[in-house]
Image: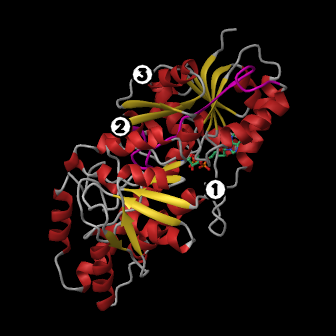
Amino acid sequence: MTTQYDVCMLGMGPVGTVSGLCFAKQGFQVIGVDVNPERVASFARGEAPFTEPGVDELVKETIGTDTFRVTADASHAILHSSIIMIAVGTPTPEETGIPDLSQLDNVAKTIGETIKNAAHQPVIVVRSTVPPGTMRGRIGRIIAEHSGKAIGEGFHIGSNPEFLREGKAIKDFFSTGRVVIGADAPDVADAIAALYKDVEGKRVKVSVESAEFAKYVDNTWHAIKVTYANEIGRTVQAFGGNPEETTEIFLADDQLNISPYYLRPGFAFGGSCLPKDTRGLLALAKQHGVSLPMVAGVLPSNEEQIDQGVARIMQHQPKKVAILGCAFKEHVDDLRESPALMVASKLLDKGVEVVGHDPFHAEGSALALPRTDKTLSIVPLEEAVAFADALAQLHNIPAYDEVVKSAGKPAENLTTITNRDPHDGQEDTLKAVS
Ligand SMILES: NC(=O)c1ccc[n+]([C@@H]2O[C@H](COP(=O)([O-])OP(=O)(O)OC[C@H]3O[C@@H](n4cnc5c(N)ncnc54)[C@H](O)[C@@H]3O)[C@@H](O)[C@H]2O)c1
């Protein structure tokens, strides 16, 4: 069956309106739907129901043409559209943080009841910001229940989050830097991607759940950036420093500061600088009566990363563990604040026997461990592997990869921060922490 519209947009708030108009501007047939009669009437008059630069002009340009219309008749729109996008609100109450998904539940029910009689297999895409798993586990399930059709058979699911900023929405739509598309099958992803024919930027095609999660990751990161800048600004002002100069110095480093480095998940940081200077900044701020709650959370979060690593090792219920790599990162011998030694201490605390190996620490030596009087014996690699019933690989070096692969023992790769250091040329070899 040939459908009349390329896209049906359910929910004509800022996100649904701007997206719908921008799809229409590229020549696609778009039908918008809203339950609010005032919103529908506003479009019929050729006016956007809210203020956003350029939107009124786009409404006037497209409304009543073949490319864009808005209706209250959801069933008509759903039944005659190839791609059904959901852009209803997902408000999050301050007290719980758990989003209210009732608007999504309502549209899912309407979609299900409507597509029961559809001859085509529409692609149903969530554009609203939702927790990962919502499309498949909640919206998809409701649609399946009410349509009697299965995901991937009677209809397809997708996620295509919106990254616009209000006030710059149309500009952001066309030069977003990337279009994120979550789908189960390449042809479904391609169908969604085709809607962006005039849009610049890379296409990132991923699972539905990864696409759903993207907005939380981005928006929280933006909040973290603002907060870090503000915490540094407060500190500089408090000691009478120059905030502009501080910012200029910080932003001038596009190797480690303003770059992808240090932004891939891995194991805890350590060494002679990061923990020490984080403590130093906190102490400086405290001396000047400045509170830095976000920076204060950094070292506890790092310790949590170590605890979770230890918990992962303990899942194997080992009696003997070999720590492969003891320095705070590979290719150096520096043991200061090494997360590997923290892991060893915490394992000893739990009654596990632990030995270590490190290419730069002599066999037969005993390394002092943090928070305990006990030491870690350094043994030859073959001996460490033979001794242990579980391996904890803290350094990504080929020799360790090799023994971990062939040892036939449970192994945890706790990848150190080293792999995020651009100077060692290994940033692309980072292994995902499973
Ligand atoms: N506003 C932004 O800058 C922005 C940017 C990116 C993503 N988002 C996300 O996109 C989603 C939508 O945001 P928004 O600001 O446009 O929301 P909004 O609450 O302003 O608009 C939602 C619209 O959906 C309509 N609606 C509710 N139930 C409906 C139904 N059953 N059928 C049809 N229409 C229905 C409402 O009447 C309203 O007009 C949210 O999840 C939001 O978090 C927002």
Q: Which comes before the other along the chain, label 1 or label 2? A: 1
Residue neighbourhood size for the residue with mark 2, other residues' Cα within 10 Å, grouped as few (<14), some (14–19), many (≥20): some
Name the mark nearer the viewer: 3 or 2: 2
| Ligand 1 under 8 Å from disc 2 Cβ | no
> Marks 3 and 2, Cα distance to the nearest angstrom?
14 Å
Looking at the picture, tell me which residue is in the foreground, 182 or 192.
182
> Marks 3 and 1, Cα distance to the nearest angstrom?
31 Å
Q: Does the magenta-highlighted stretch encompass residue 323? A: no
> Marks 1 and 2, Cα distance to the nearest angstrom?
26 Å
**Amino acid type of the residue that numbered disc 2 sits on in the rendered structure:** Gly
Query: What residue is rendered at 72% in x and 40% in y?
Result: 137
Name the mark nearer the viewer: 1 or 2: 2
* Secondary structure at numbered mark 1: loop
Residue occupied by mark 3: 197
Residue farthest to the top?
1
Residue neighbourhood size for the residue with mark 3, other residues' Cα within 10 Å, grouped as few (<14), some (14–19), many (≥20): few
| Ligand 1 under 8 Å from disc 1 Cβ | yes
**Amino acid type of the residue that numbered disc 1 sits on in the rendered structure:** Pro
Q: Which comes before the other along the chain, label 3 or label 2? A: 2
| Dominant secondary structure (helix, strand or loop) of the stretch shown in magenta | loop
Magenta region: which residues? 149-170
- From the viewer's perspective, tell me whether residue 209 is left or right of residue 57: right
* Secondary structure at numbered mark 3: loop
Task: Indicate the position of residue 3 as horizontal and vertical percent values.
Answer: 66, 14
Corner quadrant of residue 427: top left
